[in-house]
Amino acid sequence: MWEALDSWLTPADNFFFVNHYGQPNGLDEAMWRVDIGGLVARPQSLTLAYLKTRPRHEVNFTLECSGNTGLDFFIGGIGNARWAGARLAPLLEEAGVLEQGSEVIFWGADQGKVTIRDNSGVVSGGQTGAVEPDAGGALDLTITEQFARSMSLDEALNRDNLLCYEMNGKPLPPAHGFPVRLIAPGWYGVANVKWLTRIEVVDHRYAGRFMARDYVTIREEQRGGETVWTFTTVSHDRLKSAPAKVTRRGDGYTIRGAAWGAPIAAVEVQIDNGPWMATRLYVPPPRRKESRGYAWRFWRFDWGAPASGEHKITSRAFDVDGNMQPAPNDPFLASKRTYWESNGHITRRVIIP
């Protein structure tokens, strides 16, 4: 993936995609609606045609899967696009969120069977599904769950959040959420719900599969000589960078890479465990008022004429607030027992002939 990085915007046909229940069938642009309901004074049912009459807003946003680089075989779960659509915040404001509304749930059209184990041997009422005891007496509850994610009302009112219908100037491809998806700049991919059908304002934290059971980062910590396990829901992007490739011109070599996850101030590179050296950030840096640091920045380092053989290249990024991308042995990362949100230094190996 990284060797092919040659454009600031990632073409849709080269952009990664992940779905959990499969791509839904029968999505008809003319029949599609997204409803805004729950704790609102004026429920809405919006067509795509109506959204296109609203002021069009664009945002350049690098979308990364929260599992990207967390496993050795998954290194291409990232891409940068220019997303366009109608701002979410004015639509929520026009619906009139009631005083008790505090959380906003985004529901996709995709759904699937989920089996939940109840080890107490008791299944609460109010849910539809098949209940079967296993050999140990525990009960398994199988339900059909619709994909959904939530965020706080304040987070949902971010002025850059979109009900998005375009990707790089063209209609969203089906794999990327056609006809409309949520684009929430600054959040990992799972929060950017595709095939959006319903927006629901509630007075509690949503605790569905992809908030409370999956996409949860688990850490093992020692406190007072005891092991304590902590659980946090995957949400906002983390500061990250990667060496992409080494190119040769004449006798000289150049290292190129990208940095993302926050407004980028600087990137440094290390070769073969040597000193950290400054790289040069280069265009296109979008106007800050448009991107707010949501898009990746490219960087380069003129390596000169390195010795023949294998070399290790590592990068680390710094954001405008002075935060530094952590090393893999940073305690915050080292205590992690799940592969989500792996933003430690990335080291790549290259052979110079």
Image (cartoon, rainbow, N blue to C red):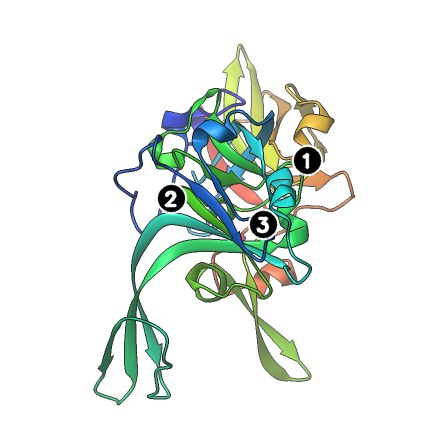
Specify the farthest residue to the front. Answer: 42
Q: Image quadrant for the C terminus?
A: top left
Front residue of 189/94: it is 94
Q: Image quadrant for the N terminus?
A: top left
Percent position of residue 96, x then y: 64, 49
Q: Amino acid at mark 1?
A: Glu
Q: Which mark is residue 344?
A: 3
**Mark nearer the N terminus (1 vs 3):** 1
Q: Which mark is residue 18?
A: 2
Tell me the SS state at disc 3: loop
Q: Label 1: how many residues lie within 10 Å, few (<14), some (14-19) or many (20+)?
A: some
Q: CA distance from mark 1 to mark 3?
A: 14 Å
Q: Amino acid at mark 2?
A: Val
Say which of marks 2 and 3 sits in front: 2
Q: CA distance from mark 2 to mark 1?
A: 31 Å
In the image: residue 173, left or right of residue 135: right
Q: Label 2: how many residues lie within 10 Å, few (<14), some (14-19) or many (20+)?
A: few
Q: Quadrant of residue 88?
A: top right
Name which residue lies at 69% across and 24% down.
280
Q: Quadrant of residue 112?
A: bottom left
Tell me the SS state at disc 2: loop
Q: Which mark is residue 268?
A: 1
Marks 1 and 3: CB-CB under 8 Å? no
Name which residue lies at 33% across and 77% down.
117
Percent position of residue 42, x then y: 58, 48
Q: CA distance from mark 2 to mark 3?
A: 22 Å
In the image: residue 47, left or right of residue 235: left
Front residue of 201/60: it is 201
Front residue of 107/70: it is 107
**Mark nearer the N terminus (2 vs 1):** 2
Q: Amino acid at mark 3?
A: Gly
Q: Quadrant of residue 220?
A: bottom right
